[in-house]
Amino acid sequence: MFTSAYPDVDIPDLSIYDYLFGSLEGDDLGKVALIDPATGTETTYGVLRAQIDAFAGALAARGVGPGAGEGEQTVLGLLCPNVPAFATVFHGILRAGATVTTINSLYTAGEIEKQLRDAGATWLITVRPLLPQAAAAAEAVGIPHERVIVLDGAAGHPNLRELLTEQAPAPQVSFDPSTHVAVLPYSSGTTGIPKGVMLSHRNLVANVQQCRTNIDLRDTDRVLAVLPFFHIYGMTVLLNLALRQGASLVTMPKFDLVEFLTNIQQHQCTYLYIAPPIAVALAKHPIVDQFDISSVHTVFSGAAPLDGDTAELAGRRINARMMQGYGMSELSPVSHAMPFERDDIPVSSVGVLLPNQEAKLIDTATGEEIAEVGAEGVTLPGELWVKGPNVMLGYLGKPEATAETLDADGFLHTGDVAVYHEGGYFSIVDRVKELIKYKGYQIAPAELEALLLGHPKVMDAAVIGVLDDDRQEIPKAFIVAAPDSGLTEDEVMAFVAEHVAPHKKVRRVEFIDAIPKSSAGKILRKDLRAREVAPV
């Protein structure tokens, strides 16, 4: 077993609201929390807290809270890009004692409907550009118009300005932070269809408190918030950590390289949280040289593996410290991060265990624990298991899936294969799980396979991750077409694109005679990978 080199940190027994905002006073209230580049509007910490309280009060006045719905807390869907209002409504929901399920802004109406239905959401909050798909999903699950809040206003729906100006008092709520579900992000786990990850207030508080040890974010920093807040990475490491540290967040609703660089230059951003595709752009794109981004001192990459060469090239080009971490939704999400005070750890690694955590490496063939560091200063590879206060409560309504991922001793089986180095750091080297990571987004092969099997010309289908020309993982479909159907690659890709968010699109197709399967009927993905010139 491996333990963190850091002493345990104290984890306050508080709600995430009280942890982030409860002790704000004096000069802190006047500091800038959020900056909207589109309008230049700045929101101070004092104003943000007042807005959160007012929004919580408006929700409570409408019956939203920890005890609504026959003893169950209310669940609200939040479909919103990175705008300052996200912070208000996200924390307003939690302040009211309700649960928020954050929804990918790129989702289709059908995908939104699935998540709302599975989460048991009875409210939906969105913005006008996303209203068509939001309204269709809400209608499908029976959420009435008056419970679809359109933050920037739409006829027939409540809006944020109306709710805030009611000035309803924030409710007095009481719950156990260790068991009360705060957020329900959706994750595919190690495989399968996306599942609701039940994260408590304590999970969120713990992970921010743990991250503060390794991630050197300060109240003088300006953070460019381009990674989506609806994703657990953006939710914890951007939004909540920045608010806890008293930093300023410059929000970006979507990624555009020119806008990204412009915002850094205009707002003198100092700290960037990114996914690997942005690191590639920083390392290689010629337009980077046209901007003055010398204000940046640190770039932290997560959500998917970043190769060391690209990281080092990006760091040298923009003269910034490059760091990397590891996590998953089920870990709230961070378990490992490169410590800012050490320069002897290669950026190709994911760093060290955060405080208050233990880890194991398990031989995937024998089930035996791996603990011995070999002559070359590294262990044999094994599946990474993690235990700590940031580990999820479980999957919503899926006890069997929970039991498969979270064992009786409290260790979360990540599905990723890692090695431990004698310097105390870890590297991810492979994966057990079937999950595909495209630009940091999770894609479950089973979800795409189920969709493909619904096509009348598809007899059987399997999906795996393969590497494209830029060494990024993309979904590839293997298709057994109906006889004499004339099915084409373009037809397959167009069919999938019509039904899923852009990041889930199938980007390669190969027709084969039969999908290789085990005697139990399980798809043999290793056989499909063996067909690839560059297997994942």
Image: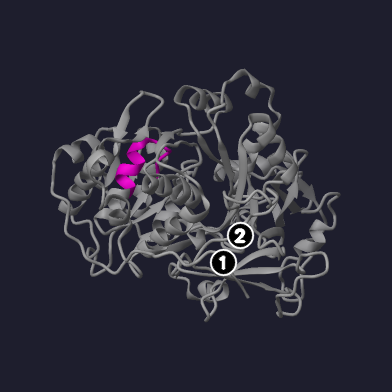
Circle 2 packing at 10 Å, graded few (<14), some (14-19), many (20+), is many
26 sits left or right of 117 in the view:
left
Q: Which range is magenta?
A: 79-90
Q: Can residue 98 be seen? A: yes
Q: Quadrant of residue 530?
A: bottom right
Q: Quadrant of residue 220?
A: top left
Q: Which residue is mark 2?
A: 352
Q: Name the residue type under label 1.
A: Ser
Structure colour scheme:
one colour
| Residue 450 picture location, percent across and down | 61, 58
Observer-nearest of 35 and 321: 321
Q: Residue at x 13, y 42 (%)?
A: 167
The number of callouts visible is 2
Q: Name the residue type under label 2.
A: Val
Q: Is residue 205 found inside the magenta-colored segment of the image?
A: no
| Residue 193 picture location, percent across and down | 56, 61
Q: Do the residues bearing badges 1 and 2 touch, measured as CB atoms within 8 Å?
A: yes
Q: Which residue is mark 1?
A: 4
Q: Regarding mark 1 in the picture, which secondary structure is present there?
A: loop
Q: Regarding mark 2 in the picture, which secondary structure is present there?
A: strand
Q: Earlier in the sequence, mark 1 or mark 2?
A: 1
Observer-nearest of 35 and 210: 210
455 sits left or right of 67 in the view:
right
522 sits left or right of 497 in the view:
right
Which quadrant is home to the N terminus? bottom right
Q: Is residue 348 above or below residue 279?
A: below
| Residue 166 picture location, percent across and down | 13, 40
Q: Is residue 85 above or below residue 205?
A: above
Q: Residue furthest top?
A: 290
Q: Can residue 157 be seen? A: no
| Residue 508 picture location, percent across and down | 74, 44
